[in-house]
Image (cartoon, helix red, strand yellow):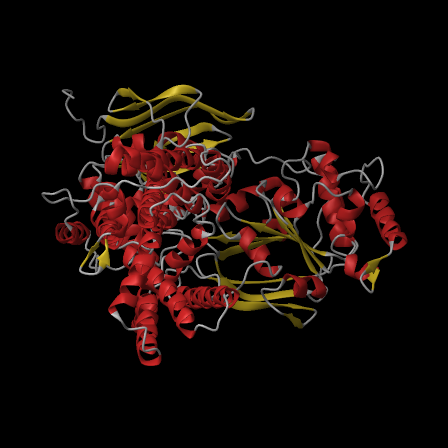
Amino acid sequence: MTDARIPGLEPPVLEARGVTKRFAGVTALSGVDLVLRAGESMALMGENGAGKSTLIKVLTGVHQPEEGELLLDGRPATFARPLDAQKAGVSTIYQEVNLVPLMSVAQNIYLGREPRGQVGLIDFRRMYADARALLAEYGIQVDVRRPLRTLALGVQQMVALARAVSINANVVIMDEPTSSLEAREVETLFRVIGLLRERGIAIIYVSHRMDEIYRVCDTVTVLRDGRVVHVGSLSELPRVELVSMMLGRSVEKVERGGVTAFRAANESDAPPVLVATDLSRKHQIDGISLSIRPGEVVGLGGLLGSGRSETLKGLSGVMQLDRGGVTIDGKSVRSGSVPAAIRAGIVMLPEDRKAEGIVPNLSVRDNIVLAALPKLSRGGFTSRRKQDAVVDVFIKRLHIKVSSPDQLVSELSGGNQQKVMIARWLAMTPKVLLLDEPTRGIDVGAKAEVQALIDELAHEGLAIVLVSSEVEEVVEGSARVIVLRDGSIETELRGDQVDESALLAALAGSAS
Amino acid sequence: MTTLEPAAGPTTDRQAARERIAGLLQSYGAAIVLVILLVVGAVGFPTFATPSNFSNILTQSSFLLIVGAGMTFVILTGGIDLSVGSVFALGGVLAAYGSTFGLLGALLFPLVVCGLIGALQGFLIAHAGMAPFIVTLAGLLGVRGLVLATTDGGSTTPLITDPVVVALGQGQVLGIHWPVFIAVVVIVVGSVLLARTRGGQSIYAVGGSESASTLMGLPVARVKFTVYVVSGVCAGLAGALNAAYSSSGVPTVGVGLELNAISAVVIGGTLLVGGRGNLIGTVAGVLLLSVIQNLINQVGTLSSSVQAVVSGAFLAIVVIIQTVLSRTQRL
């Protein structure tokens, strides 16, 4: 490169031009451009399904783009497999440490390129010395002969980083590197990132943690629905604007109400049915306390990774808790047990309907009575007559469109599948209904029906917790919105405060 | 509440000590039990601790040692090779046929053919992504068929008349048969390969975490392919030596040998899921099985069915202990 290095405008090391990637007809990336310069630290931002992970997989050779090209140091490059990308100098640090836990620290750093002596045998003494020296550069003191698995996750992450960089990397992609690190370990990681950048190594940093992004990165690329929606300097970008770009909501033009089928939600003043105190689980949620009254819809707001789904899982017993507990009508519920939660009246509609909810090869009838079977049976035998009665009631009440109760659930539309799921839990006569993305992936008409149904159930006295990535759904559906950030409650919006701009500001976690 | 904690949390000193002891027991447990049994045998039976009996045990063990060495390579990658018993028999028959061309024919012929069988299995497993269990089960059945086909349905037993070839099996130095020395060479070479070469390290890495190995750019497919070739060659070599020792290629030998080999490897402390273990452990495992059998023979009144029960019970106990030890080490 002969052109003079303009400060802040180093030559690009890695470029993507018009990258398009489809999976079974679904476009995951569409015409994505990306320019990464030497020494730059770029935040790659986007919500679920924005295409972040697909883009990373294209850059690291796991996937090949259908259209468009990659350029490395200005020359076209093709990565047929991860090894090609590594050899070309693009290394990746994954969220889950991808090393061999049974092998030693030094072995992990030098696997595949161990230093060898004269007869071609591995020179372990040199390998240990090299490993020690390498880690010392990053200020890490550790017995390099110890098996990796005996070390703290933060140190393992550092070993992965040391390995990645020592293979002559000039681009390091970090995919949520801090998600399982302690605060102290995060500091070490940031220090190392600083060292790497001084050496001219470019970094792509993926994280949901706003504070980290603003600390570590100087530029940002925002993806939404597989497209780049913003590229620019991070320091000039207010957090609220970043969040609104990720969510696809404009700050200036907050839409008026009426886009959803929710009626005006009313705040209830009955005594709370569910009280959760100090729900905590390491690296996931920390000290979440909330209470819900009968007939109330409480929204849980938050970006991806903020702990929304985890909070629901903690409430419903799906996730073990380190601390804290839940009471229903003042009686405590055994934590970490789904049956106990269901008996107490807490039921959850999971986010991933296909994987965690419906049983596709069973009929509508079987899917509805699945959870209620113990109630409908005596001595291990189920009564078909009782089942039919229950199923009939719910098909009529929820307006589930089926040819007959014997129809397979997999033949129904997404909206009707969701209603079957709701029916399954209503058959248990619950007190609290936890809804995780109840309208994702269902068409507009069905969406309105599900929203109206949620409303109706609340008016009948059910307490409902609603998680949704759609801002207007949370705002219009909920009487109050509890906003989570990095696993803790950031703020609670009630009454008139519940509007889109307030929610966006709270999601961004700053007044800026 | 800590059950879902990451297994690799920071380790306290006491935990570390406990884990180290468990690790040592896992690696050397077989050797310790072996020593105990040797002492018990020497005290209990006058005919046990004699040079001729020991030489006998070593000779009996040498064939399983070589097969077990190959099996160790395979299991370290997290695979399994069920075909070794049949390949062992094929190696013997081919050695007998090949012995008409002298020593070279008696060794080269079985080694090449058995290596090719290993290569075919390795290709299906490593490159076509088929399950090792199924591929080598097909190998077990198919190769046994091949053995029968080359011996008129098992009715002919090709004899070895070449004195040099016979000497390879029956010749002795210092009262110890040649196959024992060859087994020692296989173990030593195999140990160096595993511990001190890049290829050996890759075997541990693939068994320890295949996905991590792929992402680290290791040649995962080549590693998996190679271990099945090694296992095939080892089984063929053992079969050839066994044929030389009995001066005939008996087509019905080696039935169930794969299970003995797997038992010996696992008893020797190699994790069945791969990533950890070594050949020294396999040596201890093989000797342990042989000594148990020898002791049962010394008692004299136990039937062969009782032998099988004892070996089975022993294996079950070892696996239980190993599971406990693995848990202590939070593997």
Q: Residue A296 at x, y = what percent?
A: 70, 56
Which residue is pictured at 29% across the width and 47% down the height? A160
Q: Residue B48 at x, y = what percent?
A: 32, 73
Residue B53, image quadrant: bottom left
Q: Residue B264 at x, y = what percent?
A: 38, 58
In the rendered structure, the answer to whether residue A490 lies left or right of residue B195 reads right
Foreground pick, A409 / A333: A409
Foreground pick, B17 / A41: B17
Q: Residue B331 at x, y = what percent?
A: 39, 60
Foreground pick, B236 / A129: B236
Residue A161 in sight here = no
Which residue is pictured at 9% across the width and 43% down the height? A118
Looking at the image, which residue sits at the far bottom?
Answer: B43
Which residue is pictured at 36% across the width and 57% down the height? B270
- Total marks shown come to 0
Q: Quadrant of the C terminus of chain A?
A: top left
Foreground pick, A480 / B155: B155
In the image, residue A81 sits, relative to residue A133, either above or below, namely above
In the image, residue A386 sits, relative to residue A39, either above or below, namely below
Residue A408 in sight here = yes
Looking at the image, which residue sits at the far left?
Answer: A118
Q: Quadrant of the N terminus of chain A?
A: top left
